[in-house]
Image (tube, rainbow, N blue to C red):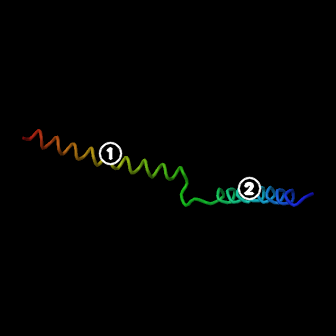
Amino acid sequence: MNLHTIFLFLLVLAAYINLYLTFQNRKQNKKTKLPISSKEWREKIEDEKFKSWISNREKLKVKRKIDIDH
C-alpha cells in the first residue's frame, strides 16, 4: 500500500462517518414533541376563520341595513 491509498481510505472513512452522524442528527430532530398537535392547530385555525366569517357577516348585515334605510 502506498501513501495515496491510505489517504484515500481515510477520506472515504471520514465521509461515511459524516454521513452516519448526519442521519443520526436528523433522527433525533424528528423525535421532538410539539407544543400543540396538528388536530388542535387545525381546530384553532378553523375557529379563528369561523369567528372572522361571523364578524364579516354581521358587518355586512349592518351595511345592508344602512343602505336600505337611505
Type of amino acid under label 2: Leu
Quadrant location, the N terminus = bottom right
Instruction: Estimate the x, y position of residue 60 in percent, counting from the top left.
Output: 22, 43
Type of amino acid under label 1: Trp
Q: Classify residue 30 by image quadrant.
A: bottom right
Say which element carries label 1: helix
Instruction: Estimate the x, y position of residue 15 in percent, counting from the top left.
Output: 76, 56
Residue beneath the point at 47% across and 49% down: 43
As drawn, 26 above or below 66: below
How many numbered marks are there?
Answer: 2
* Residue identified by numbered label 1: 53
* Residue identified by numbered label 2: 19
Q: Residues within 10 Å of mark 1 (few under 14, many from 20)?
A: few
Say which element carries label 2: helix
Q: Nearer the viewer, residue 62 or 28?
A: 28
As drawn, 67 above or below 38: above
Quadrant location, the C terminus = top left
Q: Nearer the viewer, residue 26 or 21?
A: 21
Q: Classify residue 53 by image quadrant.
A: top left
Instruction: Estimate the x, y position of residue 55 in percent, counting from the top left.
Output: 28, 49
